[in-house]
Image (cartoon, rainbow, N blue to C red):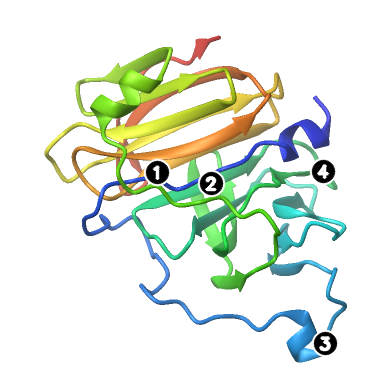
Amino acid sequence: MAVLAAMAFGVEGAAASGAARPEGEAPAAAPATVATPAETGETRADEPECVRVRGAAACVGDDESSRPGVSIEDTRNDRLHPAVEYYLNGYLGTKYVIHNLAREGEIRGSREIGKTITFRAALYKGDRRVKVSRWKTVRDVTKYPVKRDTRVTPAGARARSAICVSTRGAASTCFAEKNTFVFACDTGADEHQARAEYFVGGDPTARYEIHQLAGVNTCGKAEHGDLAISMYRASVFDDDHQVATRLYKYN
């Protein structure tokens, strides 16, 4: 359950066109671009860009930085746990969250990010978010950005996946394990959001989530490379209130 195993997991937003459903405070539709360190002269080009709250530091770094990709560090010994919440490639229809459930000083995250990433640090008490930082947008920090796929539907996700699980016909989580990927699909014509919740690489200290906000018949996608899915479930949420879920399944 090494940190590098958790960091190897990649993500890619994917949803059909449509207005994103509200989920707490999202960044503006066209968030301001943050200048790169080379442009500001304030930091070295290979140092990560970070935002912080007391107890958490979320960072985005280039391929050569000390914290490549997107990551979240637990910086305080308390009963809260930190998470990084982010959107890729300027698309607000799919939100990604990585929960760091390890101890103080530990870092979890993903090396795979988009051409643009808008992110913030958050603190959670159980499943309840209690504090967040400001949003920050960083561009062009990786040589191999993940691409945005906005045309995946629930039917297409099922056809491409080896395993699917659903919750009350309103949300489904599907995945396959050759070049591992996961879909979170909204299958209910209502005001709720579909969510995939899962663990990868046998590491119980990092929980990954895909929040699909774009509405019915859309899916969000995450890629994992060679890491296997450990546990998974599909859930339905109304903002941060859980409406329906099922027990985790082991893979």
Q: Which of marks 4 and 2 is nearer the N terminus?
A: 2
Task: Give, as a three-letter code, the residue at label 2.
Answer: Val
Amino acid type, callout 1: His
Viewer-closest of 185 and 120: 185
Please state the horizontal and vertical placement of residue 94, each as a whole percent of the image.
39, 50
Give the residue drawn at x 41%, y 31%.
183
Q: For the residue labelled by badge 1, is the local secondary structure a helix, a strand or a loop?
A: strand
Badge 1 vs badge 2, beta-carbon distance below 8 Å: yes
Instruction: Please tell me which residue lies in front, 192 or 47.
Output: 47
- Residue highlighted by disc 2: 97
- Horizontally, residue 101 falls left or right of residue 48, namely left
State the residue position of label 1: 211
Circle 3: residue type: Glu
- Mark 4 is surrounded, within 10 Å at the Cα level, by few (under 14), some (14 to 19) or many (20 or more) other residues, namely some
Between marks 1 and 3, how big is the CA–CA gap?
Answer: 34 Å
Q: Which of marks 4 and 3 is nearer the N terminus?
A: 3
Q: How far apart are marks 4 and 3 (CA)?
A: 26 Å
Image spot of residue 205 (x, y percent): 70, 30
